[in-house]
Structure formats: structure tokens, C-alpha cells
Image (cartoon, coloured by chain):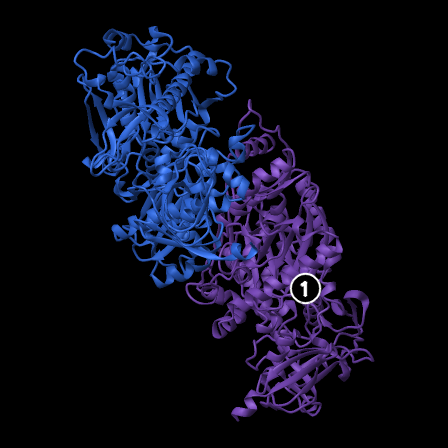
Chain colours: A blue, B purple
Amino acid sequence: MEETKKKKYTIRFEPSGLKTEVSAGTVLLDAARQAGIYLSSICGGDGYCGKCKVVVDEGQFQARPSPLLTPDETRENMVLACQTRILSDMIVTVPKFHALQTSQILMDVDTRRFSELAGEVQAGVFPFDPLVQKLYLEMTPPSVQDHTADHERLYLAIREKIDAPIMQTGFRILQKLSRVLQDSGYKATVTIGRRGGTTEVIEVEGGNHCRRNFAVAVDLGTTTVVAHLVDLTNARTLDAEATYNSQINFGEDYIRRIIYAEENNAFDEMQNRLVHDANSLIVTLATRQKIDLQDITTVICAGNTAMVHFLLNLDPTRIRREPYIASAGFIPPIRAAEVGIQINKRGLLYCLPGVAAYVGSDIVGGVLTTRLFTKKGTCLFTDIGTNGEVVLGNKDWMVCASSSAGPAFEGSGVKHGMRAGAGAIEKLTICDDGSVQFKTIGNTHPAGICGSGLLDTLAELFTNGIIDRTGRFNPAINCRAPAGAALTSGAKYSEGDEGRQFELVPAGNEHQQIVITQADIDNLVRSKAGVFAAIRVLMESTQTKLEDLDAIYVAGGFGNFLDVRHAITIGMLPDVPLEKIQFVGNTSIAGAKTVLLSRKALKTAEKIAESMTYFDLMSHPRYMDEFIKACFLPHTDLSLFPSVTETVMHRA
Amino acid sequence: MEETKKKKYTIRFEPSGLKTEVSAGTVLLDAARQAGIYLSSICGGDGYCGKCKVVVDEGQFQARPSPLLTPDETRENMVLACQTRILSDMIVTVPKFHALQTSQILMDVDTRRFSELAGEVQAGVFPFDPLVQKLYLEMTPPSVQDHTADHERLYLAIREKIDAPIMQTGFRILQKLSRVLQDSGYKATVTIGRRGGTTEVIEVEGGNHCRRNFAVAVDLGTTTVVAHLVDLTNARTLDAEATYNSQINFGEDYIRRIIYAEENNAFDEMQNRLVHDANSLIVTLATRQKIDLQDITTVICAGNTAMVHFLLNLDPTRIRREPYIASAGFIPPIRAAEVGIQINKRGLLYCLPGVAAYVGSDIVGGVLTTRLFTKKGTCLFTDIGTNGEVVLGNKDWMVCASSSAGPAFEGSGVKHGMRAGAGAIEKLTICDDGSVQFKTIGNTHPAGICGSGLLDTLAELFTNGIIDRTGRFNPAINCRAPAGAALTSGAKYSEGDEGRQFELVPAGNEHQQIVITQADIDNLVRSKAGVFAAIRVLMESTQTKLEDLDAIYVAGGFGNFLDVRHAITIGMLPDVPLEKIQFVGNTSIAGAKTVLLSRKALKTAEKIAESMTYFDLMSHPRYMDEFIKACFLPHTDLSLFPSVTETVMHRA
């Protein structure tokens, strides 16, 4: 036995061909991680989400039996990777549904959108005044008549160009300063960074290097890490790239990852993965745009509180347990190299400030981007991701909460759910004749359904009477279908492994059948109920009436087309006139870029974070009640949704 | 030849017994440095100062002949160490006159004086508000109702105790913060340092450690490094210690050392020596006072510009050549560990600000200590060291200059000159009967003459008519001696190796003969002339008349007793009533301590440094003229010294 344990086996994963060598007895999910293979996994390896299915083509293994595998799947050598131990060399096929097309994550649209947002900076909403600047200084060399020391001479020259009452210079820069100035004839470029009220000289170089000053803004999503490359000399976004968060194998939501890190003392590993993801993006962007990494002087991050803690290796454990706090909400700027981010070795890493354990800097970025904090009328902002965070307020007050609604609208916890990548159904209609029309991202074969598609699905199932107000498949469906509908066709509606399911797309040559199950619907309903309950608690606590709402901003990785009407139909958003609702996309990275480009925006972000009042919903007496009431379509109280009642209920 | 070069020889130095191993051909002075032996050396090894005499007891060597060795000395195997190459194992005796009694450098008096100056801080001239503080904070632990993050909770607690609008925390502290707070039940001690306008959290520890917060103030003298240990909780000076600057073997003045460092690329070595000296003092003080080095959170330094540059390894080369500038006058606080100073590893190193290449932070310390910058009436401050720096001014204006007068009053460049250590003649009178009365430091056998003794000697020689107004031994001395004087005795007055000399102390059992030579007198006269010429230029440039001078402060390492009357007699200081002159001792370290204990004092020191107008005397059209006129005793223009004319000239 001892001997067997020590044996090393080679595991090859198809179709990528990636290989890794592991000890006998290693869990196949761990082998996949080691090989750099992404496998869906919500439960973090506990064996109950059933996401990490793979097919064993060759080799010996020991697998724990699971009710999550159908007899057909077992016959095809499908296993749960997390429940399978390796006993020999193996060849394993990773099914297509795990595949991540990283290059397709909402890039083009985002890039355009945020170039425009940067434009807002240029137009003077915030003055263009980046956190890190390069200044070219032509100083008069010292003489017997003008004996000011180099260090003070430099400060005088800087202060002729910018306002910098408090300045600071690192020791290494001070030591090389005189040499650089003498060699360059006192014509030098200084890189200055703003740290709180202090202006730091972070680099001094001979000659004029002012035109090469770049930054990377990073959105640290639980699922996706997105990076934009920005030219700090003109505020333009040059390029964007995204990758999946490679912590994902340790759990699809961050609570799971914190538990994993605690149980396995894997905080360093968590940090390494996130830093690695950021570095990959930075290197990709720099290479593509032919930019020297030394010319990237700044990285700015926004993300939920857990991701920011993982990045900096701050203690995240009390995010998940009492007293549910962050170690730090306001992160001082630090040298990027201190966490291993590979830009200029003296470049700075900024993090947008967060509000609380469950309302992170991504939400502050959202408030900044939507300018909710400047509005006279009361507005609602909600970011639908793994958690559905909600902000309600105006220029005078802001309250916020997190619904911890679960990642259903990110495609997790849904049988054929997926992120908004290539092949994802992002738009879906069930026609009167029962046929389903859909559009995929990249107009390719359907691989699954992303957030906006799921929203459409839930709304269409409901408006077509396929599910009832409780979200249950309508038992009367076969006899109570709308006139002329194909819904009576048995083909659409079957018993799957997970109980009743509705077929959205039949299997084709290039793709599997895509269905929605009762469990999927339950998850989606719980998610929307969480968001709506949070909205209700905030509105009631602040005595905000429906008619008081001037605007609703919806952020998140839904896809490019979010049918906001459907968000009302299912009862996720309050029943306001449609023109008041705006889908604003990834406001986390938009906020990060705004701050990057304007010191005043950073100060504003800090004020936003400080002034937001956080509601802890878990301990709130009304939340559970509101949640239960919202677990209906659209709600138990139909008077809250007159427009839905009018159109849908009427139709049914 | 090749082979001989490679051979290694052991050199033993007596009486210390210290040994070193060197290659054949090594210069003996370098071997002494390597063994850690101090040898006097003014010229830095060029062979023309004749200070580095040692006796070869055993061994082969090759020595360049030197006119600076008498035939007697050569017969006794005395050599100039800098002109001697090693050809075998050797035993070398280091004559007593090189010996440095480090424990005796003006310690007791200084310690007392500066405890009183610290008292000034306590009395409220500057508020007691040290640069680095420890605060004990008892925070309410976070709860579900009070979800402020640890980092912000800490800031709130700090800001309840002190004014700190801009705060900063290092990444390493941020990373450990949550652990420390949780383990300590949110009762912790923070160490906070002031850096410009920013308050930095430099350490966080669980529990109450407030009572253990210490600092060391260091005066970086060209000759002597002095350190005082200060308790930052109550501003008390606990102990003091001094050592010779171990750069001294590379030249007795700093210009020589800069040249040496340039020629030998020995900047690192220069830094290492100074850091080593500071560390030795710190360790000695900490050991004696049973203080953990980790509890020393601050080091503050004052010194001339060159010493500060050496300490930080900043480029000092343009101090000695055009445009005669410093690399930095204002040094930002840095982590002491960055230069190798061994206190708390996150402790801070502060340097007092300097004015110019030749007016360093020691002079700013002097102005701060004497409070010249607050005076209504015009005052004069002069620090007589290797350079004689002069400051003239009042609360409205200040001008300053450096006379580069040479280190004669520090005992260098004078045959039997020595520093104010044990055995130094610090007080000397030539009686009417021609006998010499003197007092040595430590009341021991005379070993040489220190600054105050040299001042006395010059004045007494002059007032007794032994030298004339040009500083020449009076050729008429044998026939024009005052009535009843023993000066006619040939024994007092002889031809030595360096020409005519006057015997102050005849040789005894325990000590050598002590004489003053014509060359000594010339050096002393040049030194005093430099200082007086600087004073004249500053006074004339500012149209300050003699009667405008309200006070004269004299600082420097003269010894404990400075006869200020003699300083007027020889024409070093302007002829003001004696009660206007005050000997203020080592104001460099006093200033450093004042700044250490009060942020406001640091701001004041910065204002002083900024507001002083520096006069470059070398390029000043009047300086050389004034210098030549001052090379008389007391001056060519006797009308400037009415009191001297009255008493001395009358007597002659």
C-alpha cells in the first residue's frame, strides 16, 4: 500500500492534451487543477454539485458512487472528478461544457463603453489628473550662484508643474538622484504617485519619457478577471482582456474559497492564483500593444471584498463568519511588486475602497460610474453577480446591502448555465407556437445559457404559462396551453435525471440538448427573490416608495443584451416604467478606470464608501419575510407589479 | 616579484595586540585601518602631514624617506605608516599620541546640558510631541452591529488620540493587523511615525507596550560621533556615549575623505564605517540601559553635509568641487534598516535639514538650540570645528557662511594638538614669571592640548609678548621680556625640528615634552582669521555694526572651559562685552534632540534651513581681503579691538 501511494502516474487531459504527473491516490479534480485544466465546480470538491463530470478514456481509478451520475453517464465512464482517485496512468476527456473561451468575455462592448466613460473624465466631470503621472523637467543645473541641492531642486521643479504640498522620495531614488541629474544635464522625467495626501517620487530617469506611461485597471471578479490597458497620458483605453479567475477550482463562490483556504491553509495559493491571473492579463495586454512592462506604472483594482483580500493576502476569514467584517475596506496604495504584480518595480497598486464584507469596491465603482451619489432623485443600483448587491440613495444618503442570492444568474447552479462567453444563449424567446428562438454570443452553436438568457427563459416560461407563480412546472400544461401552441408537444417537456425539465434546444450535430430543470428554476427564483427582498428592505427602511424611484441601474455580467422588461416580469426589479431602467454592464472596472484617471474621483470614491450605510440582511428582521414573499412570480403581493399583472396574468 | 606580492604577512600592533594579515607590499597605514587601529592622519596618506608615525619593533619594510622624521626618530625605527610598505611579518608600536580615549569625550557635561535643553521642550517652548510615538488602543471588537473593518477601526482609534489627517500603513503591517487585533482582543499598541504630513503606522503589537519607546540622537561629527539615548515617553536623556569617527584614517577633514572615497571608490566603505560607529554607540547605550533594540524606534542625526551624505551613501563629490552643492539638504525620513542601522526593523531614521554644502544640519541644530531665529536683536552663532561656520541674524533674517578655517582648534595640524579627551590641556596660563600653569581633562598627565587650551596658549603667548602681532616669535624676546619674567630663560624657547618652538610643559616621567611651534601658531592664526573674516563679511554684508550684536554663541568641541575673553584677545570673535558671549557646547546633538521630541521643532528646523541665506566665501570678493587683515593678532585694524588694545598692547 505504502509503495502504491508513492507511485507517480501521468494523466493526460483531452482535447487539450495537457498532462500532469501525480501520486497514486490523487483526486482527479486536483490533478486537473495541477494540469491547469478548468473544471466547473460549485461545491469545491465536496461531491454534491455534480459539476465536475469528466469521461475516463483509459486507466484505472476508484470512484465513489454518486446519485448525480445517471446510469447512462456511468456506462460512458463518466465520473465526478472530485470523487475519483487515480490508480494508474489515465487519459481523461473534459466535456465541452467546462470549456472557457476567455477571449470572448464581453470584451468589445465593454471596451467601447468604458472608452466613453473615460471620455466623461476628459469632459471634466472629474478633472484629468491620474494617480500616477510622469513629468518631464528641464532644470537649471546648479552653479556657485545657485547652490540648491539636487533633491530640493527636483521638488521645486515638480512644484512648478503640479500641486504637491507634501512630497516623499524613497531612499533608493534619493541615492541615485544626483547621478541621474548630472548624467542627463538636469533634464529628467519623474514618475510621481499620489498616496493619500502625499506625492511620492517613485522613479527618476534621465531624458524625456513622459509619453510612455500606462496603467492597467483590473476587475477582480469571483468568476472572471477583466483587465483594461489605459494610456495615462491621454486617458484612452487601448485594449482589454479577460480570463477566468483561476481560484475557481477551489469553489465557485468566494465563501467556498475562504473555507477551502482555511481548511487547507491555502491563502498563499489563493493569492498566487489571483496574482498570476492579473499578471497574465497584464503581460498579454503589454505584448499585444508593444508596451514595456516598465512603462506600466499603475495597477488599480476593484472587486468584492473577498477578492481584494485574497489578492493582498489579508485575512478574509471573518467575511464568512461573525462578525462578518473585512480586515480592511480602505487599502492604502502599495508597491505592486509587494504582492508580485509585474509592472514597473516601483509602480503602485491601488484598490478602490470597499464598504463592508459583502459590499466591496466593485459596488463603490458602480455608484461612482452611475453617478448615483450626485442624483437629486432617489435611484437604485444593483449588481447581479454571485451576490446581488443593492444600493439605494441619492446625493444626500445611500444605503446598501448584499442579498447573497447565489450565482444562478452567472450560470452557476443551473444545469446548462454558463458565463457570458462564446456559445452562450444570451437572448431567448418562447413563441406562441411553442418554438424557441435564441441568439448565442458569437452566433455559434449553443453551449449553454448565460445570465440574460436565463432571465429571458424564466420570464418566457412564466409568461407562457409553462411554470406557475410558484415556479413549478404547470401540471395543467398539457391541457391549458395557449391556443395553437406547440407546448402540448411532449418533446418539449420531459422527465430528466433531475426531475421534470423543459427542452429549450434539442440536441444537434454540434451540441448537446439544452434544458431547464425544476431545480434550475428554483435557483433562479431564489436569486431574483434575494435581490428583490434586498431592494424591498432598503426601500422600506428608507420609506422610499415605488414612485420615488427616478432610475434603476443594473450592472453585472449578464451578457450584452439584458431585457429589463423581463427583470420586472419575474419580479427581480420593482415595477417602474421601463425607461427608468438602464443596464450599465461592468461598472466595477469602469469605476476603477475613472479613479485611475482622476485623483478627485478617488477622493469621491472614498467619500462614497464612507457615506454608504450598510444593512446586514442576515440579521435584519424583515429580510426573510420579504424573501419568502418574493419567491413567487412575480411576488405574493401582485399589487406591487401592476404592469405584470396586466400583461402576463391577463394572458394566462 | 609576482610571488612576493602574493605572500601574506601578519602584522601585530602594540600595545593593543590587534593583528591583521596582509599581502606583501601593503602600505602599513592600510594594514592599521584593516586591523581597526586608529592612526592620526590629516593628509589621508599623502605623506606630508607627518601624523601617522609608528615604531617598527620587528620586521622588514621599505620606507620612503621623509623630511618629517627627525634623525632621532629614524634611529628609533619610527616611520610614517603611509609611506611604509610591508615586506615581512611585523610588530609595530603605536605611540600614545594616537590613542583615543573615547569614553571621555565631553560626556558628563553634555548629558547634563542637554537634559536641560530637553527640559525646554517640556516647559512648552516646543510642545512635547515626539516624531515617533506609541499609543495603546483599547478598541471595541467588531460585531454584527459594528462592522467597521480592522484597518479603519484602528485609524478611528488612533485619531481619537492624536491629530493625524493623513495616515499610511505599510503592506506588511496591514497583512498582520487582523491577526494581532484578534489575538489581543483589540487591545494593541501602535507605533506611529511622522513622515512629512503623513502619519505612518510603523508597528502594531498586541497588548500595552507604550512605556518602552526609545530613540537615539546622533551627532555625526567629522572627528567624533556622539549619541544620546532618549526616553520618548518623558523626553528624558538616559545616557550618552561617544566614539571617534572611524572614517578618520581616510583623512581628518571631510574634503580629504571625499577625495579618498572618489579615488578608491570607497563610498560604501565610508558609509559602512559611519553606520558601524552609530551601531556601536546604539548597542552600547542599549546594553548599558538594558533596553531591547526593538524598543528603539527612532534615530535622529545631525552633522555636517558631508557626514550626512556619507551616512546615507548620497553622492558627496560636488561638496568639494563646483558647483559646491549637496545632493540633498532635506532628507526625508527613511527606515533606519535601509542604511543598516540596527534598531527596530521598521524604525525610522530622521536627519535634520541642512542649508548648503558647507552649512549642514549641525548648524541648523545650533540655531534651533540657541533660539537665534527668535531673537529681536541681532546675534552671532559660530561652531568652531573643522570648518568654522558662522550664522548672523535674528527673527527676521539669517545669513550664514563657512570659513573652512581648518581643524587647528580641533587639535589637528598642531604638533601637540589633540581632541578634548583625557590628558588634554584644556586650560593654560603663562604667568608673569614665565611659568606655565595648566589643567588637563581628567587631571591626568598632559598628553597634548585641546581646543580651549590652544586658544589659551595663543592668547597667553600674545599677551606675554612671546609672539608679536604677526604671530611670529618675538626676535626681541630675550631682551624685551616683562620685568622679572623667566622668559629670558633659554630652556623655554628653543629650535625644534620644525623651527622655533616654545616649551609649554617639559618632558616628565610619564609624558613627553609639550611645545608649540611656529607652524602651530600659524595654523591657529589662520583658523581664527578664517572665522573672524567670515564674521566680518556677514556683518558688513548685512550692515551690522559691532554695537548691534546682542549675543554671540560659540559652539564646538573645545573642551569644557572656553575662556571667551581669549577668543577676543586673539581676534577670533568681535570685541563685545564678555557677558554677551556664551559657550554653548555641542548644539548639533542638542538640536537633534529637540527635533526628536517635538514635531513642531522639526518644522521650525525646516523653516530655519529654508530661510538662511548662504554666502559662499570662496567666491566672495571681500573674504580674502578680510582674511589677510585678520591674520594679525588681534587684527590689522586695532580700532576693531579696543579692549584688547587697552589691556594687551598697553602691557607690551
Query: Between B132 and B94, which is closer to the camera in this rendering?
Result: B132
Q: Position of residue B144 (x, y in %)?
A: 55, 24
Determine if residue A368 is in view.
Answer: no
Q: Residue A126 sits in which quadrant? A: top left
For the C terminus of chain A, give its image quadrant.
Answer: top left
> Which of the 4 image quarters holds residue A628?
top left
Q: Nearer the viewer, residue B292 or A498?
A: A498
Judge from the rendering whether residue A86 lies leftward or rightward of residue A368; answer left or right. right
Asked if one can make out residue B499 in the rendered structure from this viewpoint, the answer is yes
Is residue B287 shown above or below A492?
A: below
Report the side of B522 relative to A517 (left or right): right
Q: Residue at x 78, y 78 (%)?
A: B511
Between B360 and A434, the one nearer to me in the picture: A434
Residue A197: x, y in percent? 45, 38
In this rendering, the answer to whether B352 lies above or below A592 is below
Using the image, determine if residue A227 lies above or below residue B646.
Answer: above
A568 sits to left or right of A624? left
Q: Secondary structure at mark 1?
A: strand
Q: Which residue is mark 1?
A: B243
User: Of B428 and A18, which appears nearest the observer?
Assistant: A18
Query: What subunit carries mark 1?
Result: B
Q: Is residue A389 left or right of residue B455?
A: left
Amino acid bearing label 1? Thr
- Rendering coords of residue B158 (x, y %): 58, 34
